[in-house]
Amino acid sequence: MSLQVQSQVSLKPFNSFGVDVQARLFAEAHSDADVREALAYGLEHKVPVLVIGGGSNLLLTADIDSLVLRMATRGIRVLSDDADKVVIEAEAGEPWHPFVQHTLALGLSGLENLSLIPGTVGAAPMQNIGAYGVEIKDVFAGLTALDRHTGELRDFSLAECNFAYRDSLFKQEPGRWVILRVRFALDRAAHLHLEYGPVRQRLTEQGIEHPTASDVSQAICSIRNEKLPDPAVLGNAGSFFKNPLVSAALAARLKGEYPDLVAYEQPGGQMKLAAGWLIERAGWKGFREADAGVHKLQALVLVNYGSATGLQLLDLAQRIQKDISERFHVDLEMEPNRY
Ligand code: FAD
Ligand code: NAP
């Protein structure tokens, strides 16, 4: 028995919104055996088990009547190295950004655009994390998960994960899979993605004409640090809404009315609208009621100024959804996982 199960634990330090709710039971998994032991404990005591990582994509709206299992497994290993491609595996509990930095220090390219995303390696496939034109599906080489229905381990290939924009099989089948470790195929030669947002401009400002993957990572960190609130200082869960995909006809109609609408064409003819633009245009940027608010610099980010509850944040999010739907006929979908 290595699993330490505690009763009535505040989850405030374990969610980046800093919402103060209690977990009925709480434990940390440091090995696969701990994960199995926690699941067995849940069955034996008839208590559900909720697996979390860094808590950076959660909205906790009430006390959690479950055993909350925080993944704290560690370990990074190179599985193969054929001069061009290196396959590297990390345990689910490895913090994401230090893992990205580790790959860059090994001279590997592929994860640089995903720098400074909070959370853990194990949660990264859940919503196919993405930023600045790269998603983990682009460098994904497989993962191992525990099937809670059968207790068996299963290896997933890229095709089996159903990755899509902020989505995956693991999100579609909530509570079924515990992701234990994830593999990435990274390049020795850098194939950089610089065309998204202000990345190239930032490098040019820094006088860097021929960037390395580490240069791109540093540029992205500096852009993110300027634009996004640090959860250690101001509670938030990053983007609160997904960017909506709408028909080309609706996008064209909106563009007629709002010439500065931010919209990007998607494969298949749909248009992706910048949800942050819609929310800002509707006047919500900087809005605050009690301790729940919309960030001053980035309207897509809801913030907790101190003691906001999950329900207050949810209420604000729902008011924004209603307003955006009435003004623009666009439905916004919430991104964080709600419990
Ligand atoms: P958690 O929030 O702990 O969990 C998220 C979900 O995954 C939950 O449903 C949980 O049950 C499940 N889960 C966690 N670990 C496992 C596991 N091992 N097995 C099975 N299920 C699991 N996201 C982006 O995509 N791109 C960004 O650029 C980005 N920027 C962000 C910036 C900020 C400031 C913040 C606060 C968040 C940002 N996010 C971004 C969202 C978030 O960081 C990512 O979704 C991240 O992958 C969540 O990891 P986590 O370990 O914190 O997961
Ligand atoms: P931004 O650069 O101000 O861009 C606004 C939006 O336009 C983004 O949401 C992005 O969509 C889209 N966009 C920009 N350039 C694009 C291009 N060339 N082609 C297609 N779409 C384009 O965005 P930001 O808020 O500062 O965030 C920068 C990146 O980090 C984005 O990729 C964003 O998704 C990611 N991020 C995610 C979270 C999160 O919690 N999920 C939090 C912070 C930042 P996409 O979002 O689809 O990329």
Image (tube, rainbow, N blue to C red):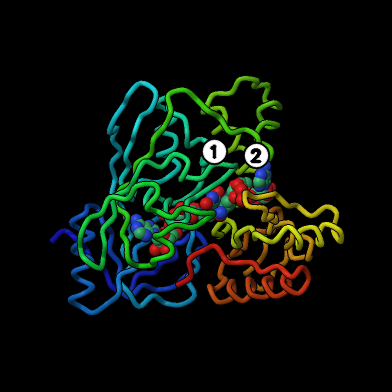
Q: Is residue 164 left or right of residue 173?
A: right
Q: Is mark 1 within 8 Å of ligand 2?
A: no
- Closer to the camera in the image, 115 or 268: 268
Q: Quadrant of residue 108?
A: top left
Q: Is mark 2 within 8 Å of ligand 2?
A: yes
Image position, residue 233 (x, y; %)? 56, 54
- Closer to the camera in the image, 166 or 301: 166
Label 2 with label 1: CB-CB less than 8 Å: yes
* Residue 120 drawn above or below residue 177: above
Image position, residue 228 (x, y; %)? 62, 50
Residue type at the position of mark 2: Tyr
Q: Quadrant of the C terminus?
A: bottom left
Image position, residue 76 (x, y; %)? 30, 38
Q: Quadrant of the N terminus?
A: bottom left
For image coordinates 39% across by 23% down, the residue present is 84
Q: Quadrant of residue 208?
A: top right
| Mark 1 residue element | helix
Can residue 107 be seen here?
yes
Q: Is residue 103 left or right of residue 117?
A: left
Residue type at the position of mark 1: Asn
Image position, residue 145 (x, y; %)? 29, 55
The residue tagged 1 is 113
Distance between mark 2 and mark 1 Cα atoms = 10 Å
Label 2 environment density (alpha carbons within 10 Å; few <14, some 14–19, many ≥20): few
* Residue 142 drawn above or below residue 207: below
Can residue 14 be seen here?
no
Q: Quadrant of residue 12?
A: bottom left
In the drawing, what numbered circle is on residue 196? 2
